[in-house]
Amino acid sequence: MASMIRFRRSTAVAWIVWLAAAAPLGAQDNPAPDEALPLKSIETVPAARPDPDSVAPGPVVELAVLVPPTPAEKPPVPEGYVAPPPDLSQPARFLFGAKPEPAPLPARSLGAYSRGCLAGGVALPVDGPSWQVMRLSRNRNWGHPALVDYLERLAADAPGLGWPGLLVGDLAQPRGGPMLTGHASHQIGLDGDIWLTPMPERTLSADERETMSAVSMLKDAGMTVDPEIWTDAHARLIRRAASDPELERIFVHPAIKRALCTFAGDDPDAADWLRHVRPWYGHHYHFHVRLKCPGDQRGCRNQSPPPAGSGCGAELAWWFTEEPYTPKPGAKPVKRRETMVSDLPAACRRVLLAD
Ligand SMILES: [Zn+2]
């Protein structure tokens, strides 16, 4: 059994907050394998055909006037001291990003994938028999118990598929919600990123998990997978990930979707899993899994199911035209909107304040 890596979450979060304060607003943290890539990214490029997950309009806040909190040395807490409530006039990403622990409430995903929060989050252990969590300093290995169960099931099956184990990227913050950097979604503990780099046989050090880069599947950064890098084991892993009954969608680069269509060949049943694998911008270093709302949880908003069919025909062909990458003539630049706590489901205020 691999050894557990210990680190002080509160220290890590203080650093994240400090880094966000020090970096220019809108700057991304290490861009390797999440959606924070500058181009063709789910976060930064408006889709010509928006995914239902895209962010709903909210109040516009001018970024220039936003001042993130400055971390300070904490004085000792006097007895009987009651902490003041957080300043809800700050954008929600600062408030949720500063919470190092989950809300001690029953587990619930509240709201929508790109606008919500998570109560009763649980951590995916940073090491398992066939997985390792990356970028530990981000403290984003939290999710609804259903997501943690799903990842453990997938990891357990991976070696049998010829895939040594999962390198797990961002899941959610301890209380979900908007993040300081990257990711429009990942807010309700049902989204997770899995690297397309196979897990090494040895246990990576905490330092390696910060600095190691994932490998793109694309040949010459183009629109085909590199046959030297992409393997059938990648395809078998994604097929297994997409076949789980809890799975809602998987996002991959269009070139990867096309490689999966080729892998499936004329298997008459392939549409059953392929329809859940959706082509999207970015996503060539990792794939993004998204689960359905667990059970009959009220307050968790499901996305409409993907269309019928494998999605290997005209829909995929569209991604190989210029249209998805060309702004519409006369289209106004998209104004960045800050999500405030008041934009989230009312229950998220309780999630934020619970202790
Ligand atoms: Zn993701």
Image (cartoon, grey):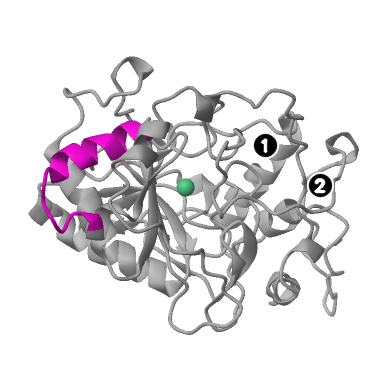
Q: Residue beneath label 1, please?
A: 19
Which of the two labelled residues, at mark 1 and mark 2, occupies the earlier sequence position?
1
Question: Which residue is most to the right?
Answer: 65
Q: Which residue is mark 2?
A: 69
Residue 247 as seen in the image, left or right of residue 102 = left
The magenta stretch is: 254-271
The quadrant holding residue 127 is: bottom left
Alpha carbons under labels 1 and 2: distance apart: 11 Å
Q: Amino acid at mark 2?
A: Pro
Q: Is mark 1 within 8 Å of ligand 1?
A: no
Is residue 1 visible in the rendered image? The answer is no
Question: Measured from the top left, where is residue 35 in percent x and y?
Answer: 51, 39
Counting other residues with Cα less than 10 Å from the Cα at mark 2, is it few (<14), some (14-19), or many (20 or more)? some
Q: Quadrant of residue 48?
A: top right
Residue 160 drawn at (x, y percent): 8, 55
282 or 137, nearer to the observer: 282
